[in-house]
């Protein structure tokens, strides 16, 4: 009897792993993992400003809530309100499942707010998270107060598909094809070198490598190749790479045809990213009556390049918006008295 070679066993075992991992469960809603940031107590008995509503903070594609913990705490302190930073499905510590489209992701946010008893929260979203925030408000304007959308607009963007393909391939091949193992003491450095073959931009590599770890998880299944003692990936890229490449650039215009809302919306434009241009501004005008656009110098990674600038812009906008609403309410009450 001929026994299969060791390589044959590894290949067959890996094929089974791929097959199993490519079949993710279908879930209408998920229990998103989150961190809650509360304002630190002040020595002043009453802080001079209060945001009035909690905030839900949403990351971008291949991101996670831990990337923004300092930002969220600063905003909670400055605005004197609760900030909930969440992991979207298939990201961070939230479970892996399908679908992965904007309708499902925005529904996840709506149900998160409902499940946690958040009355009319405001939303802050970066990139993917920005589109989720827009759709959530367009579909449920009475359930949310306002939104901050960092460097994205409500339009299809097929031009970003080559970049998404390179990003997902750099991580996927790192796990499946490189010889870098979880026991490698220099795995972070070596992983960055591997990813550079696909993504020459160091800031982008620094962002994406946060998805990779050399430790297994008791919380969720991670993408790895056990027989190779490979590194782990927090995002199930074998199952969803193609979905990312098709769904992230999309915009579900059919779901919001004819919709226009008067919720306050802030768009933060990164000057060197190309995401918010004339076509996108026209789409903003189509869907939103009350919007502001603030431009900051930087690329699409503006939140990491200039954290103080964007946090200051966001906080000051909330304060200005709140004063406007307070003034309008006072004027209305005054009119009713006469």
Image: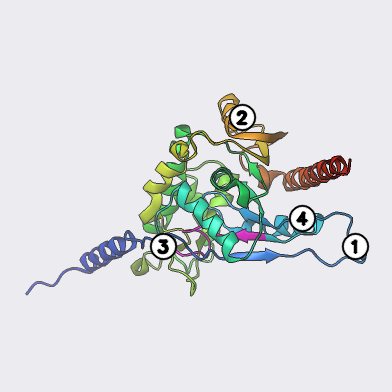
Q: Which residue in the structure is indicated by mark 1?
A: 46
Q: Is residue 314 left or right of residue 150?
A: right
Residue stretch in magenta: 84-96
Secondary element type, mark 3? loop
Comparing 261 with 35, the one in front is: 261
Q: Residue furthest top?
A: 278
Q: Which residue in the structure is indicated by mark 4?
A: 52
Identify the residue at image location x=51%, y=66%. 31
Q: Which residue in the structure is indicated by mark 2?
A: 285
User: Residue 114 falls in which quadrant of the image?
Assistant: bottom right
Query: Could you tell me if the residues under marks 4 and 1 are in contact, i.e. CB atoms within 8 Å?
Result: no
Residue 275, horizontal then vertical, whole percent: 58, 33
Secondary element type, mark 2? helix
Q: Which residue in the structure is indicated by mark 3?
A: 223
Measure the C-alpha gap from mark 3 to mark 2: 41 Å
Residue 60, horizontal then vertical, whole percent: 56, 49
């Amino acid at each position: 009897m001929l026994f299969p070679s060791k390589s044959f066993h590894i290949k067959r075992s890996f094929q089974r792993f791929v097959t199993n991992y490519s079949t993710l469960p279908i879930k209408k809603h998920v229990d998103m993992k989150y961190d809650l940031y509360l304002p630190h107590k002040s020595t002043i008995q009453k802080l001079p400003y209060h945001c009035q509503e909690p905030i839900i903070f949403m990351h971008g594609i291949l991101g996670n809530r831990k990337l923004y913990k300092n930002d969220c705490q600063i905003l909670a302190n400055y605005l004197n309100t609760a900030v909930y930073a969440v992991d979207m499905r298939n990201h961070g510590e939230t479970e892996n499942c399908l679908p992965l489209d904007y309708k499902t992701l925005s529904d996840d946010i709506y149900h998160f707010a409902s499940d946690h008893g958040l009355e009319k929260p405001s939303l802050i979203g970066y990139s993917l998270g920005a589109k989720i925030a827009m759709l959530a408000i367009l579909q449920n304007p009475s359930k949310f107060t306002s939104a901050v959308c960092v460097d994205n607009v409500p339009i299809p963007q097929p031009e970003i598909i080559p970049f998404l393909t390179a990003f997902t391939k750099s991580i996927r091949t790192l796990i499946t094809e490189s010889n870098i193992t979880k026991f490698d003491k220099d795995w972070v450095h070596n992983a960055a070198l591997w990813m550079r073959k696909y993504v020459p931009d160091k800031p982008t590599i620094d962002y994406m490598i946060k998805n990779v770890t050399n430790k297994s998880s008791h919380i969720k299944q991670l993408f790895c190749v056990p027989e190779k003692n490979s590194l782990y990936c927090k995002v199930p890229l074998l199952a969803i790479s193609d979905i990312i490449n098709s769904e992230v650039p999309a915009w579900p215009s059919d779901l919001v045809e004819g919709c226009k809302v008067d919720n306050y919306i802030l768009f933060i434009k990164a000057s060197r990213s190309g995401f918010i241009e004339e076509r996108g501004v026209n789409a903003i005008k189509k869907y939103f009556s009350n919007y502001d656009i603030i431009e900051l110098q930087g690329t699409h990674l503006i939140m990491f390049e200039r954290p103080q600038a964007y946090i200051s812009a966001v906080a000051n906008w909330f304060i200005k918006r709140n004063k406007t609403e307070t003034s309008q309410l006072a004027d209305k009450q005054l009119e009713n008295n006469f």
